[in-house]
Image: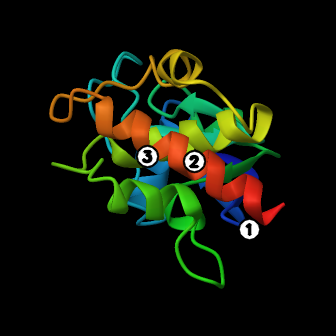
Amino acid sequence: MKKLISLTVNGKVYEVAVSPNQTLVDFLRNELDLIGTKKGCEVGDCGSCTVLMDGRPVNSCLVLAVQANGREIQTIEGLENPEGLHPIQKAFVEKGAIQCGFCTPGMILTAKSFLEKNPAPDREEIRKAISGNLCRCTGYQKIVDAIEAASVEMSRKE
């Protein structure tokens, strides 16, 4: 039996009926067509399904859609602003931190939450912050470079 929930996704309020066993990643991808959230391991190990729930990164494969009731969700599609790409997105492009792109949305959202709490991290802090997001292509060096560059750019805008 479906349950009616209300949640905000990328600034838009949705009232929808969801199955009690439907995961948040499946809801976002299948019901809202927000396919930027990737579905990887489905057991919370890879971080490719990371979204922000009330500003904190969560593995959306481990969160049921009913658990998002009353919450604010941000996906990679909601990160762009009226001026264009978010500074973290720009830095990922400029630093070559995107290869296959599968881990990129989760990495970027994890980095966003991290930089909001720690706007001037060192490289070791960056590595620790993204440790729950696996990348099989880049070796992480360019990802760390991008997050470091974004932190500098974001601090200039404040």
Q: Is residue 117 above or below residue 155?
A: above
Q: Is residue 25 above or below residue 118?
A: below
Relative placement, left or right, of 68 versus 32 is right
Residue drawn at (47%, 20%), measured in percent from left and top? 127
Q: Is residue 86 above or below residue 28?
A: below
Q: Which residue is mark 3?
A: 146
Cα distance between the residues tagged 1 and 2: 20 Å
- Mark 1 vs mark 2: in front: 1
Cα distance between the residues tagged 3 and 2: 37 Å
Cα distance between the residues tagged 1 and 3: 26 Å
**Which quarter of the figure is the C terminus placed in?**
bottom right
- Looking at marks 1 and 3 on the same chain, the residue that comes earlier in the sequence is marked by 1
Relative placement, left or right, of 39 versus 32 is left
Relative placement, left or right, of 42 versus 59 is left
Q: Which residue is mark 2?
A: 18
What is the x, y in percent for residue 69? 76, 43
Contact between labelled residues 3 and 1, with CB atoms less than 8 Å apart: no
Residue drawn at (55%, 36%), measured in percent from left and top? 110
Secondary element at tag 1: loop
Q: Which residue is mark 1?
A: 11
Residue drawn at (31%, 31%), measured in percent from left and top? 141
Secondary element at tag 2: strand
Disc 2 marks a residue whose amino acid type is: Val
